[in-house]
Amino acid sequence: MTDFSGKVVVVTGGAQNIGLAIAQKFITAGATVIAADLNSPEVDDIHFIQTDIGSEDDVQILMETVRDDFGRLDVLVNNAGICVEVPIHEMSVAQWDKTMNVNAKGVFLTTKHAFELLKEADGAAIVNISSIEALGANPTHAAYAASKGAVSSFTHNTALEYGAYDIRCNAIAPGWINTPFNEAFLDQYPDRAKVDAEIKALHPVGRLGQPEDIGDVALWLASPASSFVSGQTIVVAGGRMAKLPTPSL
């Protein structure tokens, strides 16, 4: 495993689900990890700075606090995100704006205000969490998909503009990850065993993704092992995007 001892990592949305799994992977590798979130993580070894990443004032305070309290920043993981499930013709402007504010604007703000800290590191990395919904559609997820498409595109520009400062930027596009949110979604179906089998059948690897799967890739993208990788969106979906649908005959 890559040694991140002495490194400082900020994970937005690091208090739960995929963000927490990413944070714990970096802690295991020796890093000091800060969760920038609205809620505090229920884990003692993660530092917490309460942050609304859609607020520029909050993000500025976050980065100033990181400098004052930790003295450096080596890795920024932009993970925080929300999803509204509303058909386009029924979606309010407020729902669209809220999704974009967190998922897209938040990535812009943290990237902008982390720059001065990151360029002082000896080879820094930004890892953005996009989604396979930036590449394909699910019904009622238009705002979410658009915001994650923006994250993947913004990743290209960040890699281009920050490369001269020895800062790499990549994105991860997770597929179906077995989080409490998705568990609750599946629990609404009366025949849970049938639903589980159908969801697993979408994935050539034969299982659903776990938050730790995303954590492993985030750790790799932030490590010297991926030093020649930048501006990429890595799909982590168990082969789902490689499988063409076939009719039931």
Image (spheres, rainbow, N blue to C red):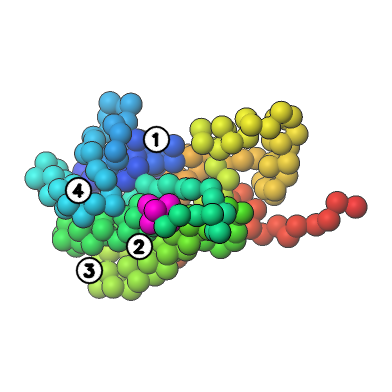
Question: For mark 4, what is the residue?
Answer: 58
| Camera-side mark, 2 or 4 | 4
Give the amino acid type for the residue marked by disc 3 in the picture: Tyr
Specify the farthest residue to the left.
Answer: 68
Q: What stretch is highlighted in magenta?
A: 94-99
| Camera-side mark, 1 or 4 | 4
Task: Examine the residues drawn in magenta and state their main secondary structure.
Answer: helix
Secondary structure category for the residue under label 4: helix
Q: Is residue 160 or residue 182 the one in the foreground?
A: 182
Q: Report x, y in % for residue 43.
A: 32, 27
Question: For mark 2, what is the residue?
Answer: 169
Q: Report x, y in % for residue 229.
A: 41, 65
Question: Is the residue 238 above or below the residue 147 in the image?
Answer: above
In the image, residue 57 lies in the stretch drawn in magenta:
no
Q: Distance between the residues labelled 4 and 3?
A: 25 Å
Q: Earlier in the sequence, mark 1 or mark 4?
A: 1
Give the amino acid type for the residue marked by disc 1 in the picture: Gln
Q: Which of marks 3 and 1 is nearer the N terminus?
A: 1
- Number of marks in picture: 4
Question: For mark 1, what is the residue?
Answer: 16
| Camera-side mark, 3 or 1 | 1
Give the amino acid type for the residue marked by disc 4 in the picture: Asp
Disc 2 and disc 4 in contact, CB within 8 angstroms = no
Question: For mark 3, what is the residue?
Answer: 165
